[in-house]
Image (cartoon, rainbow, N blue to C red):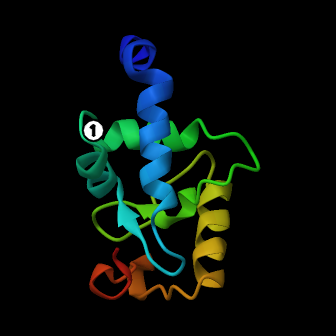
Amino acid sequence: MEEERSQNGPRLYERIYAAVRQIPVGRVATYGQIARLVGGCSAQMVGFALAALPNGSDVPWQRVINAKGKISPRGIGFGSLIQRTLLEEEGIVFMQDEIIDLNTYGW
């Protein structure tokens, strides 16, 4: 991965961040969707880019979820709670099993 980062690193990450900034308030996108939009990267690389964001970034990372409509675990779970809270503040409703309806809230 380090090699991928050094070759594509800042430019690739900036393209990922630019795509994520386009997701409107109250909507979500999947890691794979962002990867396809950006091109030349995988869903996992999108996750790495979002994990590398500094605190206080203007990138709405909380709006990116997995293909099952769920929040992907972060760290020891605290980040997942923050992500859920931020999404709920944007009006996104979680169904049973912590799932977000992509037909309703998908971008």
Q: Tag 1: residue type? A: Ser
| Location of residue 86 with respect to 9 vertically, above or below | below
Q: Position of residue 74 (x, y in %)?
A: 56, 50
| Residue drawn where x is 60% and y is 65% of the image | 83
| Residue drawn where x is 51% and y is 81% of the image | 26
For label 1, the SS is loop
Q: Quadrant of the N terminus?
A: top left
| Residue drawn where x is 64% and y is 56% of the image | 79
Q: Position of residue 105 (x, y in %)?
A: 38, 82
Residue with the mark numbered 1: 42
Q: How many marks?
A: 1
Q: Is residue 84 left or right of residue 17?
A: right
Q: Position of residue 100 (x, y in %)?
A: 40, 79
Quadrant for residue 86, please give it: bottom right
Quadrant for residue 72, please give it: bottom left
| Residue drawn where x is 42% and y is 40% of the image | 15
Please tell me which residue lies in front, 71 or 5: 5
Q: Quadrant of the C terminus?
A: bottom left
**Structural crowding at the residue carrying mark 1, measured as other residues with C-alpha within 10 Å and reported as few (<14), some (14–19) or many (≥20):** some
